[in-house]
């Protein structure tokens, strides 16, 4: 696996092939940004550890996680699996997560709007499509 | 009728390049960018399955991808060799396609599969979403057949 990690204070960047995941620790929330294209064969080896760690740390810091897919140009179906698992883990447990996708990109609207099944009535878990 | 035929190795690292080649072809067929992206996704999901579950023991074994764009529809077919231990995969493929056909709206199948994934353990590494995504996002009808020389062909056909 091609894997690069870079840490600079409150932000980190992880690269695997054409997918870049940027992590930023803000005052009120932690943002995990997906950029590029994901053709990952085993996203559980790359994406899941990042999301699980951020979820755990965010719960401890009492901060919301923002998972931002707006700059993602393509993903294979396997890539959504760790996202589903982390959303469910937070849904039945603790943690606040906002998933943001780009509504104007048809494939994003189709893929990510379906995550609405994990949204909670108190918006602790929320799925947001932005134009 | 425009046609693209590619011979693909089992090297996962080549999928990104294949995706780009397919996009160039589909755009040359004057499909809108949104449709080109959708059908490139379908072709890549089928190719990923062929790499994951195909047999590449023989030196000449490769995957063949054929995309035909007609005036009314598009067909995408991926063919690969299958080994002696592929019975379970073929049964699973058959079950999955029959299961998807049981839904009037493929969106319901997609949601049901996502819910099933959410109930699986964190380390379960098989998504099983690819075929469902092809029917839901790709708006394609799936089928497969076993060829004479131990080959499996999986096709996705969609109206343009």
Image (cartoon, rainbow, N blue to C red):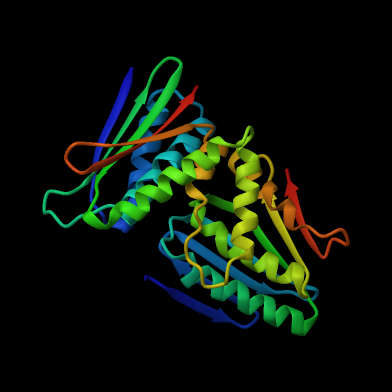
Tell me if A30 is positioned left or right of B50 in this view.
right
Residue lying farthest right?
A122
- Residue B55 appears at what percent x and percent y? 23, 54
| Residue found 48% across the figure and 52% down from its top | A76
Give the camera-side residue of B33 and A111. A111
| Image quarter of the N terminus of chain A | bottom left
Give the camera-side residue of A6 and B70. B70
| Residue found 11% across the figure and 54% down from its top | B59
The image quadrant that residue B106 belongs to is: top right
- Residue A103 appears at what percent x and percent y? 69, 43
Give the camera-side residue of B99 and A30. B99
Please tell me whether residue A68 is drawn above or below residue A113 in the rendered image. Answer: below
Please tell me whether residue A30 is drawn above or below residue A104 in the rendered image. Answer: below
| Residue found 52% across the figure and 51% down from its top | B129
The image quadrant that residue A12 belongs to is: bottom right
Query: In the rendered image, is residue B39 in sight?
Result: yes
Please tell me whether residue B41 is drawn above or below residue B28 in the rendered image. Answer: below
Residue lying farthest top?
B71
Query: In the rendered image, is residue B137 in sight?
Result: no
Tell me if B19 is positioned left or right of B152 in this view.
right
- Residue B150 appears at what percent x and percent y? 20, 44
Give the camera-side residue of A40 and B99. B99
The image quadrant that residue A65 belongs to is: bottom right
- Residue A11 appears at what percent x and percent y? 62, 76
Please tell me whether residue B133 is drawn above or below residue B30 in the rendered image. Answer: below
């Amino acid at each position: 696996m091609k894997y690069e990690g870079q840490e600079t204070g409150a932000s980190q960047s992880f690269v695997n092939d054409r997918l870049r995941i940027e992590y930023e620790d803000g005052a009120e929330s932690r943002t995990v940004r997906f950029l590029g294209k994901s053709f990952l064969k085993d996203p559980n080896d790359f994406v899941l550890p990042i999301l699980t760690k951020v979820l755990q740390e965010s719960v401890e810091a009492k901060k919301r996680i923002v998972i931002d897919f707006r700059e993602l140009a393509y993903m294979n179906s396997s890539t959504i699996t760790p996202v589903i698992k982390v959303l469910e883990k937070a849904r039945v447990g603790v943690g606040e997560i906002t998933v943001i996708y780009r509504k104007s990109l048809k494939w994003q609207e189709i893929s990510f709007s379906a995550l609405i099944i994990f949204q909670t009535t108190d918006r602790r878990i929320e799925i947001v499509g932005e134009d | 009728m425009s046609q693209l035929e590619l011979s693909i190795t089992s090297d996962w690292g080549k999928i990104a390049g294949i995706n780009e080649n397919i996009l160039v072809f589909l755009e040359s067929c004057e499909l809108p960018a949104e449709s080109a992206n959708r059908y490139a996704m379908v072709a890549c999901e089928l190719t990923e399955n062929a790499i994951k579950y195909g047999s590449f023991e023989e030196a000449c074994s490769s995957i063949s991808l054929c995309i035909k764009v007609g005036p009314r529809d598009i067909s995408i077919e991926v063919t690969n060799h299958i080994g002696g231990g592929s019975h379970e995969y073929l049964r699973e493929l058959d079950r999955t396609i029959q299961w998807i056909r049981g839904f009037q709206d493929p969106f319901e199948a997609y949601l049901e599969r996502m819910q099933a994934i959410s109930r699986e353990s964190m380390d379960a590494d098989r998504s099983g979403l690819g075929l469902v995504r092809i029917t839901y996002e790709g708006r394609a009808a799936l089928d497969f057949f076993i060829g004479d020389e131990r080959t499996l062909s999986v096709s996705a056909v969609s109206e343009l």
